[in-house]
Amino acid sequence: MSYFSIEEDKASQSTWDIRAEHQWGLPGIRHCPGCNASWGTDTRAYPSVDLSSIAHLARFDEPRAAAFAEYERMCELVRPLLPPGALLQPGSAFGPLVGNAQGRFGPLVAFFPWLLLVQRDALEKLQAEGVQGLKGCRTQLRFRQRNAPELLELEILPVGRLHPDCLPAERKPPCPRCGREGLTLPDDRLLDAATVPNHLDLFRLEDFSTVIVCTERFVEACRRLGLDGVVFQPLPSV
């Protein structure tokens, strides 16, 4: 199986603007007791997760940094609501994208390098082609135009990892408390095929969650269907 990373197609005829964020999120952390790092990132998003039943128990609607004990307490509140295979990290996001959008959108939209939107009819075509593991979630985007598209956010699980051969030989293990690895994304990337399940055609890297990866089956289906808006960069694997 061949793999590809997905990136925005800057040469596309699509001209769009989105200003939105997820409805809820975990806080970042201040001074992890395991590594003393203060950090948080929303590059793991689970738009299918509805926190309305527990939102009154903690401050999920305000981006901020929190003490590690508070972060851990909030993780335990969220954990029972997660889809199978989901992994948490400081700053993880939940619920629909809420905000404003306008412009001309292609079938696929790389809102951020780590966030992929799809028009509903394109998603249905990909699923009909047998592409596996695609889960589209409703957004709450307000369009200032007629004939607005129905954009769904793809919920992308973190499962694969880069192969150690493309990473620094001397590196620290992940922090046992917060999971931070503190590595810089290498320019020359090599996917560790042993970490990739065979039931997903779309996933994000577990160790570098800004990178969205797809299989050749996903790429071939997009090309047959003429779905544009993104480009596919070959990702060698071993």
Image (tube, rainbow, N blue to C red):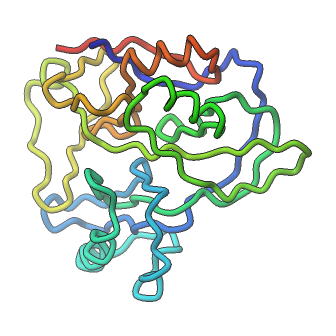
In the picture as drawn, the residue positioned furthest to the bottom comes out as 56
* Residue at image location 62% in from the left, 33% down from the top: 109
Q: Quadrant of residue 35?
A: bottom left
Task: Give the image location of residue 149, x and y in percent.
Answer: 76, 42
* Residue at image location 67% in from the left, 44% down from the top: 151
- Vertical placement of residue 157 versus 168, above or below: below
Quadrant of the drawing holding the C terminus: top left
Nearer the observer, 234 or 187: 234
- Vertical placement of residue 213 versus 177, above or below: above
Q: Quadrant of residue 176?
A: bottom left
Task: Give the image location of residue 76, x and y in percent.
Answer: 25, 75
On the rendered structure, is 181 left or right of 226? left
Task: Give the image location of residue 150, x and y in percent.
Answer: 71, 45
Nearer the observer, 81 or 113: 81
- Vertical placement of residue 111 versus 232, above or below: below
On the rendered structure, is 115 left or right of 43? right
